[in-house]
Amino acid sequence: MQYRGDETTGFPSPARDYLQPVVDLAEILSLRDPGIYAVRVEGEGIPERAIQEDDILVVDTCAEALPGRIAILFTPQDARLGILVRVGGILQVRLSEGMVHLDEDMEIWAIVTRLVRTKV
């Protein structure tokens, strides 16, 4: 006689009714959708929005750039993290060193939609 795992003896586990499915973060965070990316924060982040170094930001390249949202910006030198602000009808970006006008040298690449904290 050969043992098969699906034919057990004894009583079934009462905990079997309380088993939870495996947590799929890619599904929860929509990482399989086009235009959705995970980006790790390097540097100081944005303390006023509780974004810290090593956090993972889920960003959407198709999301609308609205005031109050956090954006990933590309400049000729690097990628930056900033808060979009409307001043006098013009969309500007608040960076760690102050307000900056959006111009041809600065492109809004994506908008932050979720934050995953890696350290508690």
Image (tube, helix red, strand yellow):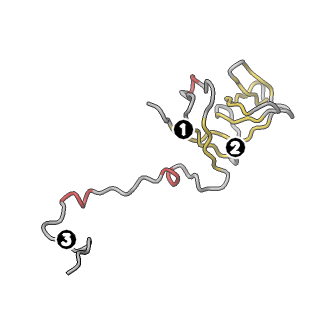
Q: Nearer the viewer, mark 3 or mark 1?
A: 3
Residue 30's spot in the image, x, y percent?
Answer: 56, 52
Residue 36's spot in the image, x, y percent?
Answer: 63, 49
Which residue: 61% across, 24% down? Answer: 44
Circle 2 residue: 64
Determine whether label 3 and label 1 are within 8 Å by CB: no
Image-quadrant location for residue 38: top right
Q: Is residue 103 above or below residue 19?
A: above
Which residue: 71% across, 31% down? Answer: 80
Q: Is residue 94 above or below residue 57?
A: above
Quadrant where the C terminus sits is: top left
Real-space CA distance between mark 1 and mark 2, rounded to the nearest whole angstrom: 18 Å
Real-space CA distance between mark 2 and mark 3, rounded to the nearest whole angstrom: 55 Å
Q: Which mark is residue 115?
A: 1
Q: Which mark is residue 77?
A: none
Image-quadrant location for residue 10: bottom left
Q: Which mark is residue 8?
A: 3
Q: Amino acid at mark 1?
A: Leu
Q: Amino acid at mark 3?
A: Thr
Q: Earlier in the sequence, mark 2 or mark 3?
A: 3
